[in-house]
Image (spheres, grey):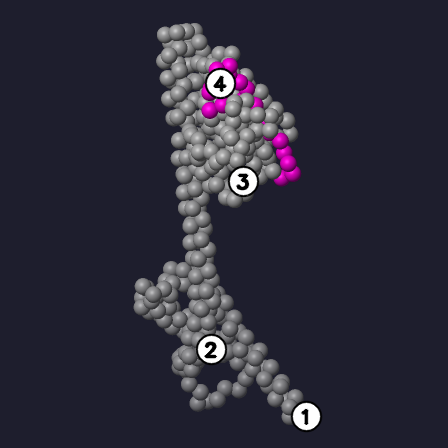
Amino acid sequence: MYATRGALRAEWMWVAMQLPRWLFWVPFTPLIFAATRRFPLVRHRMARSMLVHLGLAAVMIVLAEGAYAQLSLVVERLTGSTIAPDRPPALVLTALSVMTRLVSGVVTYAAVLGVASAVESQRRLSDRDTRAAKLEADLARAQVQAIKMQVQPHFLFNTLHAINVLIREDPAVATRMVTLLGDLLRQTLSRATMEKVSLRSELEVLALYLEIESVRFCDRLKVMFDVPDATLSALVPDLVLQPLAENAIKHGVGAMTAGGTVRISARRDGDTLILDVVDSGEGPVAGTPSRERIGLSTVRERLERLYGANHGLTVEPAPEGGCRARISLPFEEA
């Protein structure tokens, strides 16, 4: 038992004496990580990186083991340990210490290098995923903008044509339409890069558009809004309602001699925002699939880009007659 205790005591003393040797590697760890970032162990740079790391390992082993050997000599002098008369000089002892610890030093460097390489590889993968996600988001944003811009020229050409006709028939009305068109273009151009706006802002632009159409249709077009204040702060895609209103006027009210009504409504149903554009025209025949009208395809593409499967767009006969275009979106506060 006493012999065992003595052996354990000797082992603990040996461990305690080795602790400073490993502590000398602590300052080298950040350097190894920095060298790994600068010279990664990748296939196309493997040979060069290995030479660099072998050189660094040799330098660090010399420094760490040399410092440990010098520390051991200092401890011997301070403790008054008996020094054999035939012991080699300090410089030779240092060189011997470095040589005998060369393999373990290489193993130590390799262990730290392995951890640093794993961390660096993970960082590169994370950066690559981040860049890929950013590129994908930028591409989706550009596609949404391109789709959105398809709506504006169609309306602009129609309006300019109407103004051209009114210049000869009623110059005062034509002047009013030019003013309204200028206000509308100023609004749309000021947010050309925006993907989403508040419903309040969307309705402001829509009101300008509908006012232009009301001037063109005189007393044949009546517009109604049914939008609670609680929904005005919801986020919606920019210019998402204008194509629906344009279809309602062109294919609903415009197709009727006596004109008709276009009603825009909004309501919240739990976490869903529901937007309706209803006209009092003849409407589609129930149960008969209708052709995707102008503007609806662009709206559908934009909704798919922005919300994926978490949206709805339907065009169907309205319960009160006419046609109803309905958009359902996740309710998001602006």
Compare marks 1 and 2 and give the one earlier in the sequence: 1
Q: Is residue 62 above or below residue 44?
A: below
**Residue 262 painted magenta:** yes
- Circles 1, 3 touching at the beta carbon (< 8 Å): no
The quadrant the N terminus occupies is bottom right
- Can residue 277 be seen from the camera position used here? no
| Residue type highlighted by circle 2 | Ala
| Residue type highlighted by circle 1 | Met
Label 4 to label 1: alpha-carbon separation: 110 Å
The magenta stretch is 251-271
Front disc: 1 or 2 = 1
Q: Quadrant of residue 43?
A: bottom left
Label 2: which residue?
69
**Residue 119 painted magenta:** no
Label 3: which residue?
311
Q: Is residue 221 above or below residue 232?
A: above
Q: At 40% from the left edge and 60% from the top edge, which residue is drawn?
A: 37
Label 3 to label 4: alpha-carbon separation: 32 Å
> Which secondary structure lies at badge 3?
loop
Left or right? Give the position of 213 relative to 153: right
Estimate how packed mark 2 is, as few (under 14), some (14 to 19) or many (20 or more) residues with alpha carbons within 10 Å.
many
Label 4: which residue?
256
> Which secondary structure lies at badge 1?
loop
Q: Is residue 231 above or below residue 207?
A: below
Label 1: which residue?
1
Label 1 to label 3: alpha-carbon separation: 79 Å
Compare marks 4 and 2 and give the one earlier in the sequence: 2
> Which secondary structure lies at badge 2?
helix
